[in-house]
Image: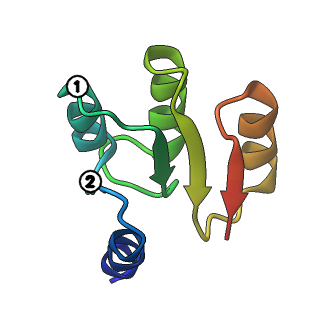
Amino acid sequence: MHSQFLKSKLEDVHFKSYFASSGEQALSILESGKNIQILVTDLNMDEMDGFELLKRVRKLYPHIFRVVLSAHKGPFMIKQAIEDGDIHEFFT
């Protein structure tokens, strides 16, 4: 539901967007060579959580701006990810 709202808003301002239901699927989209400049992710995902996805994206695609949009309640882990440089912005 939230992804449809976000997709609609991004399309309203003419942003091309890709959506993934897991960290593995997100990496697959990135590997396809599409010109992706911003990654918006949740932290709670199956298979690979958002923290792991952010670490991998930071290492493999350091030019991509990384944003978290999540209701995750682990302030220590979020603070650590920001300090490590895995997250540029965090929104709840």
- Is residue 17 rendered to the left or right of residue 37? left
The spot of residue 78 in percent (x, y) is 73, 48
Q: Nearer the viewer, residue 85 or 46?
A: 85
Q: Which residue is at a point 33% across and 79% down the rendered structure image? A: 8
The spot of residue 44 in percent (x, y) is 47, 58
Q: Which residue is mark 1?
A: 33
- Is residue 76 rendered to the left or right of residue 20? right
Q: Nearer the viewer, residue 92 or 77?
A: 92
Q: Which residue is mark 2?
A: 18
Which corner quadrant of the image does residue 71 belong to?
bottom right
Mark pair 1, 2: CA separation? 12 Å
The amino acid type, in three-letter code, at marker 2 is Tyr
Is disc 1 surrounded by few (<14), some (14 to 19) or many (20+) residues within 10 Å? few
Q: Which residue is at a point 51% across and 16% down the rendered structure image? A: 59
Is disc 2 surrounded by few (<14), some (14 to 19) or many (20+) residues within 10 Å? few
**Residue furthest out toward the front:** 14
Q: Which residue is at a point 30% across and 78% down the rendered structure image? A: 4
The amino acid type, in three-letter code, at marker 1 is Gly
Q: Is residue 24 above or below residue 33?
A: below
Which corner quadrant of the image does residue 25 belong to?
top left
Which secondary structure lies at badge 1? loop
Q: Quadrant of the C terminus?
A: bottom right
